[in-house]
Structures are given as C-alpha cells and as structure tokens.
C-alpha cells in the first residue's frame, strides 16, 4: 500500500498535502489555544514495526514546548522518525524507547511509564520497541485535543490496522474507543482486542488491562 507519509515536507509546516486544507481551517479557528495543531513539528502518525505482534490504538501525540529541541534539533532523532514513517528497518522502530534519545525527550519518559510493568518482568527497551506498533487517530501534535473530522491521511492508518487484524495481531485499545470503532470496519467485533480500564492513564499493567487481558498481552508478546 502506498505510504503518504513518505511525502511529508522536509521543512515546516510539516503537513501532508492531503491534510493541508483541514488542518489550516482548524488552526485558523483555534490558533493560540491549547487545541492548535503544532505543524512546526513533524507529526507522529505511528511508531513501531509494521508487522509487530501488538498494535496500540491511541488518540493523538501530545505537545510540549520542549519537543522542538529533540524533534528539530537532534538529527539522529529526526532520521529515526523519518525511518519509522517509511517503515525502514532500525534497532528501535518505536523510537521513543531508544535510550539514545532519553535526554530531553518527554516521549521517552511517557512511554517508559506506560511499559514499566513489562520492564519489571524482564522485557527490555529493545524488546518493547520491536513488539508494539502505535497508531494515532490524529497524527498532528496538540497540547489538548479538540474533536475534529478524521483527516484524509487516516485512510492509510486504517489500512495498516485492517492489515494487522487480517494477520490476527493483538489490538490494545488505549484511548478513544468510539472514534476507532466508528472509523474502522470490524474493529468493534474483532475478537483479539483488549482495552485499558482507565483510558486517561493507558498504562499496560494487570490492573489496567485486567488479569485476563494481561495474560493475553504477555502471550502475544511471547509468541512474537
């Protein structure tokens, strides 16, 4: 399937041509508010291995004023993002888990917290970085989320998820269950899906997934 993210501009604004009209109209309305889409930074539509055994469904990447330092100021991090957008092979396809990018990267702190229960049972950063595929319903960063129509680029995200369901990947619903179910045919009845009990704090843990959900997750990770 054709990957539109290979055509992302190399300079700001970092917006796909297909999304430009919707993003521009949204930002004209919400400029200067916490809902503004930060197109001065590269979007993060997904992260991880395309054929990962576990797919995480999230809402959108958050925004911090500190993001620019690593996303625009670290050439290796920029290349890692680009490699992931193109699904190129790399040691840490879920790039926020790469320990080389720990310093000054709030994404590292965020995802290490979400995976910490796995680390406690001897899953390391590299194992997790190669075992999960994170999909965002909305790829552009904002400090707070304001509901808007799904963007044209979501068509590619949907196809990634449908392909994962076709190969029987485990799907973990982190956030925004209704948005995903309305957007992706068959997801609501997909048998290999588990969900977080607390979507406001989508930590992968026995408490948040339930004992059976946790068992299913570990089984999928062990099967690879």
Image: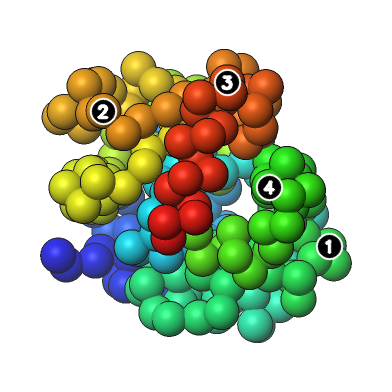
Residue depicted at 26% across the width and 28% down the height: 191
What is the quadrant of residue 193 in the picture?
top left
- Horizontal placement of 47 versus 170: left or right? right
- Distance in Å between CA atoms under marks 3 and 4: 14 Å
Residues at discs 1 and 2 in contact (Cβ within 8 Å): no
Instruction: Judge the density around disc 4: few (<14), some (14-19), many (≥20) Cα neighbours within 10 Å.
Output: some
Residue depicted at 47% across the width and 45% down the height: 219
Q: Which quadrant, please, contains the N terminus?
A: bottom left
Residues at discs 4 and 2 in contact (Cβ within 8 Å): no
Residue 7 vertical placement versus 66 (above, below): below
Residue depicted at 42% across the width and 56% down the height: 223
Q: Where is residue 89 in the image (x, y as percent from the top left)?
A: 43, 81
- Disc on res. 210: 3
Which is nearer the N-term, disc 1 or disc 4? Answer: 1
Residue 208 vertical placement versus 96 (above, below): above
Residue 100 vertical placement versus 201 (above, below): below
Disc 1: which residue: 104
- Disc on res. 95: none
Front position among marks 1 and 2: 2
Which is nearer the N-term, disc 3 or disc 1? Answer: 1
- Disc on res. 118: 4
Q: Position of residue 67 (x, y in %)?
A: 72, 56
- Disc on res. 191: 2
């Amino acid at each position: 399937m054709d990957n539109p993210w290979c055509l992302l501009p190399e300079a700001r604004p970092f917006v796909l041509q297909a999304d430009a009209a919707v993003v521009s109209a949204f930002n004209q309305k919400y400029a200067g508010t916490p809902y503004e889409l930060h197109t001065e930074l590269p979007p993060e539509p997904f992260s991880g291995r395309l054929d990962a055994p576990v797919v995480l469904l999230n809402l959108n990447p958050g925004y911090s004023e500190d993001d620019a330092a690593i996303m625009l100021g670290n050439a290796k991090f920029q290349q890692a993002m680009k490699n992931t957008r193109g699904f190129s092979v790399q040691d840490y396809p879920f790039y926020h888990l790469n320990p080389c990018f720990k310093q000054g990267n709030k994404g590292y702190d965020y995802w290490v917290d979400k995976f910490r229960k796995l680390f406690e049972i001897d899953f390391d950063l590299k194992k997790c970085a190669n075992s999960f595929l994170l999909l965002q319903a909305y790829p552009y960063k904002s400090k707070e989320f304001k509901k808007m129509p799904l963007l044209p680029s979501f068509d590619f995200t949907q196809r990634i998820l449908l392909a994962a369901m076709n190969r029987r990947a485990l799907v973990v619903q982190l956030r925004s269950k209704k948005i995903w179910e309305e957007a992706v045919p068959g997801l609501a009845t997909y048998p290999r899906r588990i969900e977080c009990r607390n979507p406001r704090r989508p930590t992968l843990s026995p408490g948040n997934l339930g004992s059976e959900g946790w068992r299913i997750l570990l089984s999928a990770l062990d099967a690879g």
